[in-house]
Image: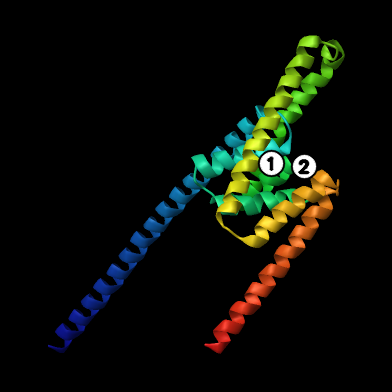
Amino acid sequence: RGLGDVYKRQSQYTRTIYMEENQKQQSGKEEKKQDKKSDKDQEKRLWKIFWSTFYLSAFTFGGGYVIVSLMKKKFVDEYHWIEEEEMLDLVAIAQSAPGAIAVNGAIVIGYKLAGIAGILTAIAGTVIPPFLIISILSVGYQTFRNNQIISLMLEGMQAGVGAVIASVTYDMGAGIVKKKDALSYVLMAGAFTASCVFGVNVVYVILICGIVGVLRALIEKKITKKGSDEK
């Protein structure tokens, strides 16, 4: 009888160990499947980021403001990867940072979507098309620089670029107006007047607006903390 009890206990112990090992193996397989799935999803997203930025950079004329606006339409309106308000913050960061705004925009959007890998992918997609196009054009610059057809084509592009920038400005401004925030109205009007009427350097305008935003955030945080302490 004693040996029988010992045998039963050993059998139960062996069965328990086997079940635990089996569960560990199953959970390990599930984790591997999830990791593979997440890796595939990440790879697909990186390819989408690359081809989107490559396409926009290759077929966009008129500078960084145009490509950033088209990035907004692509990643906010079409893919729904970024909220519109967050996109405004990313554009503000891109404008405030030194360097080309198209590359800055690619950096902040790439980091938001896929981290460091997203940055490298977005930069590659943004830089490669103009690099190739300018390299090719520089070879035949002497041939077509005085060509009247090309001059007229570039003038037409300038008009189209102005319309695109105006459209994007309206869309972004409308989003701010909808918030019905008095300080935002004052900043928009003040920045426009300082830049367009008085010719103040845009760098100073951005810095002042940034300082006002920081002060506002600190004041709101202090008021919120004071209200919670009183409760």
Q: Is residue 33 left or right of residue 145?
A: left
The secondary structure type at the circle numbered 1 is helix
Q: Is residue 178 left or right of residue 143?
A: left
Residue, x 50% and y 48% (percent of image)? 39
Give x and y (percent) for residue 138: 83, 21
Q: Is residue 33 left or right of residue 86?
A: left
Residue, x 54% and y 38% (percent of image)? 48
What residue did someone put label 1 on? 123
What residue did someone put label 2 on? 100
Q: Is residue 1 visible?
A: yes
Nearest-to-viewer mark from 1 and 2: 2
Residue, x 67% and y 69% (percent of image)? 217
Q: Amino acid at mark 1?
A: Ile
Q: Nearer the viewer, residue 13 or 96?
A: 96
Give x and y (percent) for residue 218: 69, 73
Give x and y (percent) for residue 18: 29, 68
Give x and y (percent) for residue 141: 84, 17
Residue farthest left in this picture? 1
Q: Are marks 1 and 2 in contact (CB under 8 Å)?
A: no
Quadrant of the image occupied by residue 226: bottom right
Other residues around mark 1 within 10 Å, as few (<14) / some (14–19) / many (≥20)? many
| 74 versus 151 height, above or below | below
Q: Amino acid at mark 2?
A: Ala
